[in-house]
Image: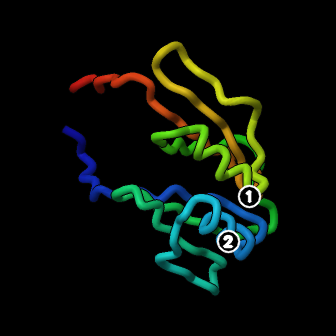
Amino acid sequence: MSEIEYDGRAVCALEVADLERSLQWYEQALGFEVVHRLESWGWAEMDTHLPGISIGIGQTEKPATEGGVVITFGVQDIDKARAHLESFGTRFDGETRQIEQEVRLATFYDPDGNTFMLAQRLAENPRPKG
């Protein structure tokens, strides 16, 4: 058992150059909703519609462009999700890839170059216990 008592929530914080542009993109392209905003800090938190997981967006003069966490969204239909994102001019890193009969993956970027991935499971993979 862990010494840390998690409360079931996680905020994935990202740096962006233009808060308003990013909020609009996240709302329209991904369907997220602003749940909290601190104007004086240039910060907003968005509900992802995934239990306990939200995205925090902070405006900064020079967003990080290398490294960082890649947030992966599990989807039912990767082709449909990709087409929707592409309708907003979303840039993808090449074609959708498939790993054997397990999963299909597509890497994409928000307007500030933050990396995300779509994943469609092709087979049920039980999670290891313990």
Q: Is residue 52 above or below residue 86?
A: below
Asked whether residue 69 is in view, the answer is: no
Residue 27 percent location from the top left of the image: 60, 68
Residue 125 percent location from the top left of the image: 34, 23
Residue sticking out furthest to the top: 100
6 or 57, which lies in front?
57
Residue at 71 percent across and 48 percent down: it is 109
Q: Could you tell whether 30 is left or right of 107 in the image?
A: left
Question: For the residue marked with disc 1, what is the amino acid?
Answer: Phe
Q: Is residue 60 above or below residue 63?
A: below
Quarter-wise, where is residue 38 in the image?
A: bottom right
The quadrant in which the C terminus is found is: top left
Residue 98 percent location from the top left of the image: 59, 21
Residue sticking out furthest to the bottom: 40
Q: Nearer the viewer, mark 2 or mark 1?
A: 1
Q: Is residue 79 above or below residue 25?
A: above
Q: Mark 2 falls on what kind of element?
A: helix
CA separation, marks 2 and 1? 11 Å
**Which label belongs to residue 88?**
1
Q: Could you tell whether 125 is left or right of 35 in the image?
A: left
Residue at 67 percent across and 71 percent down: it is 24
Question: For the residue marked with disc 2, what is the amino acid?
Answer: Gln
> Between disc 2 and disc 1, whose residue precedes?
2
Task: State the residue position of label 2.
Answer: 24
Q: Mark 1 falls on what kind of element?
A: loop
Q: Residues within 10 Å of mark 2 (few under 14, many from 20)?
A: some
Number of dots carrying numbers: 2
Residue at 27 percent across and 49 percent down: it is 4
Q: Residues within 10 Å of mark 1 (few under 14, many from 20)?
A: few
